[in-house]
Amino acid sequence: MTWVTLYDLKDELCIDDDDTQFDAFLTRKRNSIIAAIESYCRRSFLASDEDETIDFPRGVVLLKKYPIIGVSAFFINGDASTEFYLENETGRLYYQDADGNPMKYWSNTNAEKSVRIQYRAGYESNAFPDDLKDVVFAMVQQAYLNRDRDTSQRIKFEAIPNVISTAYYDSANLHPTFGAHVDVLNKYACERGMLP
């Protein structure tokens, strides 16, 4: 399962389904671009089932994967419970007080030694954000259109007369860079390390 199928790529690039000569190339580029995007954003996007245990929850509790699609089970100290509130878009998990109100922070006064939550999170393939798909399409298209470019064009020469001259391989043209797509990716970048 992937966000962008080979069929989607070929349709976007106007390649006939019967033309399979670039299938391996497109699949390899798609996979490496998706891996680079997930690495840059520090999160995985495709929906999956998760089982997470948080020992001695304190402060803001953030689940590892989001957005949350649904919760199948929640336990406090091993006992099933419904005393939680979840922000689906951010994956923030709150304890509910006796009146059912979400408490902003888990505190040291709470008696929770562990919290376990089983949930489904991420984006289902049929509900994947179009702007993320568009980044993959654009980057694969760039790689596809440049696949036959003469590598000698990537060799750069620089010289200072009577001092030094050098030739080097311009690797910037070999590796995908996000360029204009950074703004889109920053919307999805995980900020877990920056939160309290």
Image (cartoon, rainbow, N blue to C red):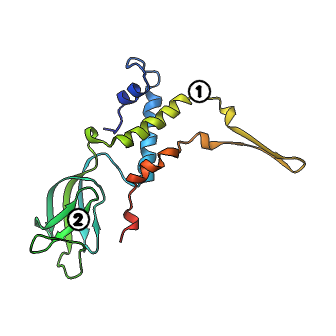
151 vs 99, left or right, is right
Q: In the rendering, which numbered label is found on residue 89? A: none
Disc 2 to disc 1, how far (Cα)? 50 Å
Closer-to-camera residue (56/68): 68
Q: Is residue 178 above or below residue 119?
A: above
Residues marked 2 and 1 touching at CB (< 8 Å) = no
Specify the farthest residue to the right.
Answer: 162
* Residue at which label 1 appears: 148
Estimate the x, y position of residue 143 in percent, counting from the top left.
52, 33
List x then y, in percent, for residue 86.
Answer: 20, 61
Residue at horizontal 69 percent and vertical 32 percent from the top: 152
Instruction: Tell me which numbered mark, 2 or 1, is placed earlier along the sequence.
Output: 2
Does dot 1 land on a helix, a strand or a loop? Answer: loop
Q: Residues within 10 Å of mark 2 (few under 14, many from 20)?
A: many
The label nearer to you, 2 versus 1, is 2
Which residue shows up at 26% across the image and 43% down it? 124
In the rendered structure, which amino acid carries the disc numbered 1? Asp
- The image shows residue 195, relative to residue 6, as above or below, that is below
Q: Residue at x 16, y 66 (%)?
A: 84
**Residue ID for mark 2:** 93
